[in-house]
Amino acid sequence: MSNPTKNDRYQRQISLKELGEIGQQKLKNAKVIVIGAGGLGCPALLYLAGAGVGRIGIVDFDIVSLSNLHRQVLFSVNDIGLSKALRAGDVLEQINPDIEIIVFNEKLSNANALEIIKGFDIVLDGTDNFASRYMINDACVILKKTLVYGAISRFEGQLAVFNHPSETLTSVNYRDLFPVAPADGEVLNCEEAGVIGVLPGIIGTMMANETIKLITEIGNALINRLLTYNSLNNHFFELELVAIPETSKMIPESANAFKTFNYDWFCSANSAFELKPEEFRQMMQDKNIQFIDVREAGEAPQVNDFEHINIPLSHLQEQIPEISAETIVLFCQSGKRSAGAAEILSKHYGTSRKIYSLKDGIASWQKPKYYHNVRKKS
Amino acid sequence: MQVHLTLFGQLADITGKTEMILHDIPDTETLIKTLHEMYPLLVNAKYAIALNKKVIKENTILIGDNNIALLPPFSGG
């Protein structure tokens, strides 16, 4: 038996005549960055490293938690509390020491995105929020990088290749499909809506597959097309995307414009203003402001520090009471329900009222006291 | 002249249906108006509209039978 050589590693895929030695060389020369080492990022990273993509970037700022393990297949219980990006880098290094792995153990923001992404050719978006998705799309448009997009919701997944340079086609980007970002809370994330581990496994693996096809130039990648997959009934649905002149105007024109664009604000532009805890505390003194607790009646911890009324969100959804105050401040436990209530009231009252929601809820403004109360109960 | 409508993601949750057949719909604007009357929660939902598997951005006149899909954005990863 001969000693294994480096080429043995890729022998099974090199023997595919469509890929061959040339395809393998293209993979070796490729530079791919995966943003988000989560449910989509983990399987994508595994297969890209296995296939021999020469330079792989990993961006994630989060740490591994137990509730990640059912879908984030690079991690084990020993990794809980450790950096996802660093741990993912270690695992990939063990799978394939012949490739270069660059770890960015930080949150991608418009301050660092262009610098981080520019060293790569293909970007995989495996993030879990709209602000990041719009920001990554815009960065790819500005830097002219191909974007492999994957996203999931409950039992359904979406997959597309955006912004791929082509001589014959006008490239389509994420904003051509969804020009307007959903408001905060309009679309639930995995934490709120739930997800079965295998779905991001499937979509993330398909993202890796599209990437490998793009690099080796085999098959038909989903360029300017969107594929959806429903894991409950195994239905695939594919549609053709079109570029819209108006959407290009929404994308920051320059690197400087990109760095000053507020993506968090853009992605909650339709909801009311969010208050920081210190702003909330200042407003508490103002007797002309109507404070409304939108939690269900009797929900702990109780708030006695300032005058307020209780109208649960579930009631607001059915009937909106007449509120005479010009300024309304809504709060709840975590800031989610109050954001929802703010949206309902904004739509009802239009610009006749100033409507605010306490960001991150009452947990954020008097942590020690209320946490103490909660602890005493348990 | 009918529309075979397919709904994805949370739009299926709002309507309680993944598929629907609608009759006498002359254009896509009328389709959306009809859906808003049937399901008021759709008014604030954001989605792309695909006519016969191609995304459209403007009101489009419907001749004959058509397949229309409404696809919301997903953020999960």
Image: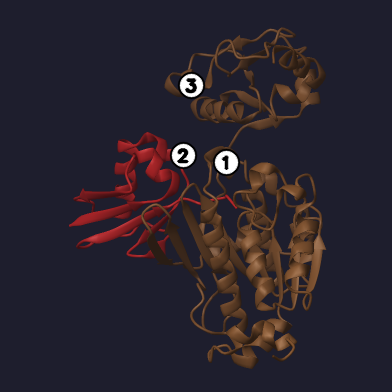
Chain colours: A brown, B red
Residue of label 1: A183
Q: Amino acid at mark 2?
A: Asn
Q: Given this view, does label 2 or label 3 mark the residue nearer the observer?
A: 3
Report helix, strand or loop for mark 2. helix
Q: CA distance from mark 2 to mark 3?
A: 17 Å
Q: Quadrant of residue A337?
A: top right
Tag 1 near tag 2, CB within 8 Å: yes
Q: Is residue A164 above or below residue A232?
A: below
Q: Amino acid at mark 1?
A: Ala
Q: Nearer the viewer, residue A242 or A227?
A: A227
* Tag 1 and tag 2 share a subunit: no
Q: Chain of mark 1?
A: A
Residue of label 2: B44
Asked whether residue A109 appears in the rendered view, the answer is no
Q: Relative to residue A157, is residue A3 drawn left or right?
A: right
Asked whether residue A171 appears in the rendered view, the answer is yes
Of the 4 image quadrants, the one containing the C terminus of chain A is top right
The residue shown at (60%, 39%) is A184
* Tag 2 and tag 3 share a subunit: no
Looking at marks 3 and 1 on the same chain, the residue that comes earlier in the sequence is marked by 1
The residue shown at (49%, 26%) is A348
Residue of label 3: A314
Instruction: Give coordinates of residue B34: x percent, y percent.
Output: 29, 42
Q: CA distance from mark 1 to mark 2?
A: 9 Å
The residue shown at (71%, 16%) is A374
Instruction: Give coordinates of residue A296: x percent, y percent.
Output: 55, 16
Report helix, strand or loop for mark 3. helix
Tag 2 near tag 3, CB within 8 Å: no
